[in-house]
Image (cartoon, grey):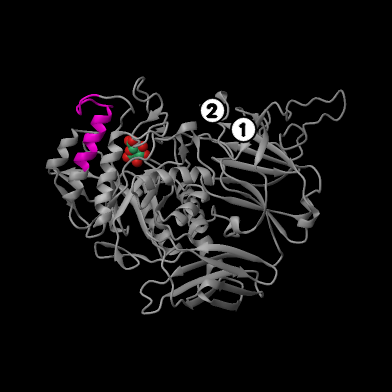
Amino acid sequence: MRFLYSLLLPFLCGAAAAQELSLANIPGRRTVSLNGRWNYIVDPYETGFYNYRYQERAYNDREAYWNSDVPDNRTDRKEHGWSNKYTLQVPGDWNAQQPKFLYYEGTVWYRRTFDFDPKGRGGRVFLHFGAVNYEAHVYLNGRKLGSHKGGFTPFHFEVADSALKEKGNNLVVKVDNKRSAQEVPTLNTDWWNYGGITRDVSLVLVPRSFIQDYSLQLLRGSGPVDEIGGWVRATPGSTVRIEIPELGLRQELRATGDSTAFRFRAAGLQRWSPERPKRYRVLLSNGSDRVEDQIGFRTVEVQGSSLLLNGKPLFLRGISVHEEIPQQARRAHSRADALQLLGQAKELGCNMVRLAHYPHNEHTVRAADSMGLLVWSEIPVYWTIDFNSPLVLGKAKAQLCDMVIRDRNRASVIIWSVGNETPVHPARTRFMTELVRTARALDSSRLISAALEVHMINGKHTIDDPLGAETDIVAVNEYLGWYGGLPSDARKAVWDVRYAKPLFFSETGAEALHGFHGDSLTRWSEEYQEWFYREQVAMMKRMPPQYVGISPWILNDFRSPRRNHPVYQEGWNNKGLYDQKGRKKKAFYVLKAYYEEMSRR
Ligand code: GCB
């Protein structure tokens, strides 16, 4: 098997894609963190970017905010400046950091200075951002390095050696989180549009000849002895060594101009599973460079309407999760945040999380790997994006590619989702099918899905979305008893599933304000939500055998500007099983009991 990586990637991911040069495993490399306090300027009119004729400023324009804010002399006029009165923490959204930012959507300029240790010279340097929401323009010492769109995926720019000074480098980032009909996501979402440099920033230092990217997967159906297959992409001509010391595996190969394939027989391999999330230390080196990773090996596949992990039937005890710490109403971004959220899922008895509705930070998938939680990872193709636009398709593909490229060595990730609740019509189905095929071509070792909707046809809850013909798993969101009818309607619900494939309920849920009590018929009460869950669980128990799991909506209450009830919501979607302060609601225990039962089966 030879994966023509560099040829295939632009073809699959489109011109808008993804980085020309993928850099796998940033945490496993030599980095210099640029996290910390950055200066900022709020710029709702984008004055630092456009002149008064609304043209992008020339690079040497003195009023461009990427240029010096220091007046040349006493008579000189400068109308912007960086001040330590105005600082923001990076990583972090701006909304949670100061009250004036709570609802802000627009441009904020960030600036920090840094020194560059000359010992870092001699190799290649990349400036890496874990994510910036939504659009970033990046300038170093007055020169533009590039720009990036997409609020939840990583990107980097190479920095020429000559562009770095030993003292006082000036790094400026224009961040704009304005929503737009032509972007992914679009204008309309049910989550908070947190803006800012929301994930880690670092300089990545690599030698001239280096390991760029690699993939290692346990091969499906590899016979009596497990086999690991993969490829590595390194500077052509260098000799790459791949080692898994614990398994006594070691192979050397000569890197070609493209990716170079390899295969190992891995006798005695312990497979990764939620019960035993075994990972192996994997070392890749090529004389000058050395990258270390922790990789688990497992297979995931669909056979008929069964879902198999390591060849055995798998039931997904899931929960949907937003990347948000409700206690501080902010984006989650750190390992500690990931441990908090995934720890809550564990407490609920989950073996799986649906990371909705966009790729979460890398700490989360790495923590899921070590904690033994399976992951559904999604791109924000949500509701009503412009399905007729090839440009929008290009943007969605770029995010899909960046998601897969970052996380393809994580055993926890078993499902790539290409979107959520997109309305059925021919242009949309063409658009979504293209995404499904792209995902599959990029990564044939995982399953592809999308959260679909249910349609009422002749009194039956029908799953007939034509996209279901393309996905490996048919996943649906269903709110019977919340967005229509009463929870008890679930008792007489008849399901008509038109696909003989694994069936997954990617959402179901009801709101409840923690501490608000009433009888079970009282909307917003914990008792209503509890009743809803009881009825849903009873219905799930009657599902046909193709039913392979559920990820109810949602782990925690989360901020949403769409949720405007002045008593029960106040800007929060309260479908959490935990409330804004991390307290459990009654429904938590219903789902937990169901998961305990399912884990014994
Ligand atoms: C959905 C969406 C999710 C919403 C949820 C709700 O179907 O996929 O993003 O937040 O319903 O609470 O209505």
- Residue depicted at x 69% and y 72%: 287
Residue farthest along the top direction in this orientation: 566
Amino acid type at circle 1 is Val
Q: CA distance from mark 1 to mark 2?
A: 10 Å
Q: Position of residue 358 (x, y in %)?
A: 45, 46
Amino acid type at circle 2 is Tyr
Q: Which residue is mark 2?
A: 104
Horizontally, is 480 left or right of 184 in the view?
left
Horizontally, is 442 left or right of 384 in the view?
right
* Disc 2 residue crowd, few under 14, some 14–19, many 20+, Cα 10 Å: some
Closer to us: 330 or 465: 330
Residue 380 in view, yes or no: no
Q: Position of residue 532 (x, y in %)?
A: 22, 36
For residue 357, which numbered disc appears in the image?
none
Magenta span: 518-536
Q: Which residue is mark 1?
A: 108
Ligand 1's quadrant = top left
